[in-house]
Structures are given as C-alpha cells and as structure tokens.
Amino acid sequence: MEISSAAFKDGERIPMKYVMPGAGGKNISVPLIWRNAPPGTKSFALSMVDPHPVAQNWVHWLVINIPATTSSLEEGASKKKMPHGPVELKNSFGDIGYGGPQPPKGTGDHPYVFTLYALSVEKLDLGTNVSLSAFKKALDGKILGTATITGKYGR
C-alpha cells in the first residue's frame, strides 16, 4: 500500500498554507491519495502525529471509518469536504479534525507522520474525544496494512 500527497514529497517540507494560523498558515488539510490497499480491506483509518521529542506524539489529525472505496482526501477536506462516512476525531489542540503544524519556535524541523491503516472491519466505534493510545488500541488485530508519508516543518 502506498500513500502520497500532491502538496509535498515524503521527507520534504509541508507548505505554509497547511500549517496553523499561529505559525503563519491557513490550517487547510493536506491532500492525500493512496493505492494498492490489501485484499479484504473494509475501511481505512488515518493519523497525523508529530513524534518530535518536544511534541511527544502530538496528534494533528485522526480519522476513522473511511470507506474502503475511498482512495483520497482532497485538499481542505477536513470539516468541510470529507467523503460520506469518515469520522474525524479530536486532535491535541482540542478541536475536531485537522490541526496543521505549529511547532514551538527554535525546536528545529518537526516530522509530521501521516499513517494510513487498512482495516479488516467496516467501522470502529470510538468517541470523538479519544487519546492516541486508545485510537491505536482500537486498531489492534484489525490492521491489514499501513502506509506512511512524512512532511517536515519548523520555524
């Protein structure tokens, strides 16, 4: 399974419009496209996490119940143009949906890891206010495959 973005290549800088207003951006969710899901995939889940030591796995975006027939999320989809079915969960900023990069000044480039999970179930029953560990626990035993893309951002 592969995931990519028209906005940046794996390992490259995330453009300004996708970062939080506090860091000078517009907080528009990044476009993502994926292909080659494993046979038997019934849904997808998505996470965007900053594992930088300062950020300590800060959650920027969690999405569950993305239908198996979906193969992309368009630019700006979060909270506005999501396909029918997906549920966006609360991020570490305390908001539902996408929260772009906003690393503390002077902490260097932060990696923003987007992970797409191909799942063997159609739906996950999670409340919107779920921790990253609870999100990951809900995926246990249901993951058929994963794909990641990492964007960087620092200020």
Image: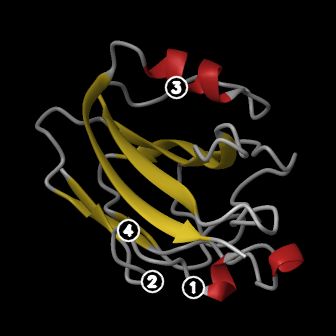
N-term mark: 4 or 3: 4
Instruction: Give the structural element (helix, strand or loop) at label 4.
Output: loop
Residue ID for mark 2: 7
Residue ID for mark 1: 15
Label 4 crowd bin: few (<14), some (14–19), many (20+), radius 10 Å: few
Label 2 crowd bin: few (<14), some (14–19), many (20+), radius 10 Å: some
Label pair 2/3, CB-CB below 8 angstroms: no
User: In the rendering, which numbered label is found on residue 124?
Assistant: 3
Q: In this view, does 125 lie to the left or right of 45?
A: right
User: In the rendering, which numbered label is found on residue 68?
Assistant: none
Residue 2: x, y in percent? 21, 57
Q: Relative to the observer, which residue lies in front, 154 or 121?
A: 154
Q: How far apart are marks 4 and 1 (CA)?
A: 12 Å
| Disc 3 residue type (three-letter) | Leu
Residue ID for mark 4: 11
N-term mark: 2 or 1: 2
Label 3 crowd bin: few (<14), some (14–19), many (20+), radius 10 Å: some
Label pair 4/3, CB-CB below 8 angstroms: no
Which residue shows up at 16% across the image and 32% down it?
Answer: 40
Label pair 2/4, CB-CB below 8 angstroms: no
Residue 19: x, y in percent? 70, 75
Residue 19 sits above or below residue 99 on the image? below
Label pair 2/1, CB-CB below 8 angstroms: yes
Image color mode? secondary structure
| Disc 2 residue type (three-letter) | Ala
Which residue shows up at 45% across the image and 47% down it?
Answer: 66
Q: Nearer the viewer, mark 2 or mark 1?
A: 1
Q: How far apart are marks 4 and 3 (CA)?
A: 30 Å
